[in-house]
Amino acid sequence: MEHKKVNWGFLAFLALEVILMIYLLFWGSDIDLDNVLLSTVLAESTIFIPPVFILALSSYDEGIWARVGFKTFRPLTLLAVILYGVLIMPLGTLANAVSMLWVDNEVLASSEAMLNAPWYITLISSAVIAPFVEEFTFRGFMYLGYRRDGARISAVIMSALAFAFMHLNFNQAAYAFIIGVAFALIVEATGSIWASIICHFIFNFDSLAYMLLTNYLTPGAYEDVSVDRAEILESIPTYIIIAAVATILAICVLAWAAKLQGRMSNLRQLFEGKTEGEDRVKIITAPIVIAFILCLTYMILSII
């Protein structure tokens, strides 16, 4: 069953992450973790290797490339995907703001290394490598793997949870879950993970461009990474209004993309209940539960 491979793959990612942390702690003194490209490649490799290994050992009639969703879509669908990517950003911003009422902004904490690197290196690391690898793993390998076994909305939720826990901190996990759901929906609407890769690129590029532009116009703006929670609390009502309007529009664009691709029935199917006589696979197994518990434990201990 595909979901068993997927769940073991996520646990394998966590094991590789632990191995990498231990290596860097005891033997990695010569590795420059302030090198944005190097640190990105190291981190993303732990996410990329397990699914590649598992897929390589598996056999698929349509081929591995198609199995993980690398399929083309209509040119007009590209416009819908870009619009969708832009429209889901306010919801991610809202989730980020709410999370910062309790925890620190992890991206701000790493802003010094990102700003010290050449802008094109930071761009390649954050807006090219990360979106490709993470969408390959969490939407291509995980989400579409669950869907092959007949899972519907549970496939959306589980792949989004895995994407959230992968970040290993509550701040990024908050908005990663939200956009993880949104990315899974656009993959279902288009039938291609190129759609979620594009949306992920837009999301990361927007954050990066804002950071670089702000630092250029106001040098030293990111030297103080403290968060004014009172100011954030005051701004949340505005975020809610903007996110609500943008999300409604995003849903409309999502439906448009599905119609362009002839996949409205696929999208609707996610929210349909179990039909009579249907044998639905339970995709939650021991490896994914263990992995989620370990991730959550690490996240809690990191803020104590």
Image (cartoon, rainbow, N blue to C red):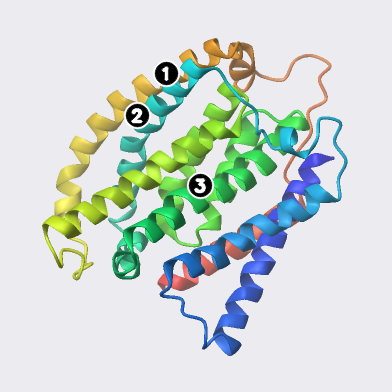
Note whether 290 is above or below 22 in the view shown.
above
Would you say the residues marked 1 and 2 are in contact, meaning their CB atoms lie under 8 Å apart?
yes
* Type of amino acid under label 2: Leu
Mark 2 and mark 3: span between their CA atoms?
Answer: 18 Å
As helix, strand or loop, the secondary structure at mark 3 comes to helix
Q: Position of 185 compared to 178: left or right?
A: right
Q: Which residue is mark 2?
A: 87
The image quadrant where one finds the N terminus is top right
Mark 3 and mark 1: span between their CA atoms?
Answer: 21 Å
Note whether 94 is above or below 112 in the view shown.
above
* Type of amino acid under label 1: Val
Q: Tell me residue 172's x, y (percent).
A: 42, 54
Label 3: few (<14), some or many (≥20) within 10 Å? Answer: many
Label 2: few (<14), some or many (≥20) within 10 Å? Answer: many
Taking depth in this image into account, of 290 and 15 the one nearest to the observer is: 15
Task: Please give the label number shown on residue 253.
Answer: 1
As helix, strand or loop, the secondary structure at mark 2 comes to helix
As helix, strand or loop, the secondary structure at mark 1 comes to helix
State the image quarter where residue 125 is shown. bottom left
The image quadrant where one finds the C terminus is bottom left
Q: Tell me residue 153's x, y (percent).
A: 61, 29
Q: Earlier along the polypeptide chain: callout 1 or callout 2?
A: 2
Q: Which residue is mark 3?
A: 131
Taking depth in this image into account, of 231 and 84 the one nearest to the observer is: 84
| Residue drawn at x 25%, y 55% as measured from the top left | 211
Q: Tell me residue 91's x, y (percent).
A: 35, 36
| Residue drawn at x 42%, y 21% as measured from the top left | 79
Taking depth in this image into account, of 290 and 83 the one nearest to the observer is: 83
| Residue drawn at x 27%, y 56% as measured from the top left | 101
Residue 290 visible? The answer is no
Mark 3, mark 1: which one is toward the viewer? 3
